[in-house]
Image (cartoon, rainbow, N blue to C red):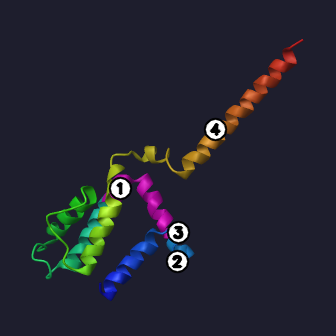
Amino acid sequence: MNERALITLGLLLAATARNGPGRALGDLHQKLRDYQAREPANAIALTVLGAAAAFYVAERGKNPKVTSFYDALVYASTNLSVGYSDIFAKTSGGKAIGSLLMTYGPALAARALDTPSAAATTGPEANRLDEAAVDRVVARLDAILNELRARTP
């Protein structure tokens, strides 16, 4: 494996690690996760277009099956959804892009039809909302219990 491929894989690992290098990378990671949860269809479109552009740049002139941006777009979209394509990456950069798409794609594609409101009911924010709702119910039940005890002769 050459040096560029190792750097690419290291960057991918750093970008997806929860405790990545530096607070800025962690903040970026969280913003991307939040965006994907809020706007799943837009996240898919941006991922496919960005990966296709990067794949086209990496493979153009080196891969006989990548003769246009459309070929790279087909590669990115099929890798994102089913994990493989009839086009195979020839360069280290193309292979890294394909690995990212095959790893990240199924989770992203699974949320493709979620509505933005559905995203608000999942994740850590939903747990906070559920805890607040439980606290309100418990407080209300305590008030009812206290009132019943006060009425008992």
**Residue under pointer 1:** 108
Q: Which residue is mark 2?
A: 21
Q: Quadrant of residue 72?
A: bottom left
Counting residues from the N terminus, which is met first, the one under dot 1 or under dot 2? 2
45 relative position to 122: left or right: left
Q: Amino acid at mark 3?
A: Asp
Q: Which residue is mark 3?
A: 27
**Quadrant of residue 140 in the image?**
top right
In the displayed image of the protein, which residue is found farthest to the bottom? 3
Mark 3: few/some/many CA within 10 Å (<14, 14-19, 20+)? few
Q: Position of residue 99 (x, y in %)?
A: 30, 69
Q: Are marks 2 and 3 in contact (CB under 8 Å)?
A: no
**What whole-number distance in Å separates the C-alpha atoms at marks 4 and 1?**
29 Å
Say which residue label 4 marks. 133
Instruction: Return the x and y of residue 19 as percentages of the image width and height.
Output: 54, 70
**Residue at the spot 21% in from the left edge and 59% down from the top edge:** 78
Q: In this picture, is 43 found above or below 137?
A: below
Asked which secondary structure carries label 4, the reply is helix
Of 51 and 7, the residue lying toward us: 7
Q: Pointer 3 and pointer 1: residues touching (CB < 8 Å)?
A: no
Q: Please report whichever mark, 3 or 1, sits nearer to the chain's N-terminal start.
A: 3
The amino acid marked with disc number 2 is Pro
Quadrant that contains the C terminus:
top right
> Visible in this render: residue 137?
yes
Alpha carbon separation for disc pair 3 and 1: 20 Å
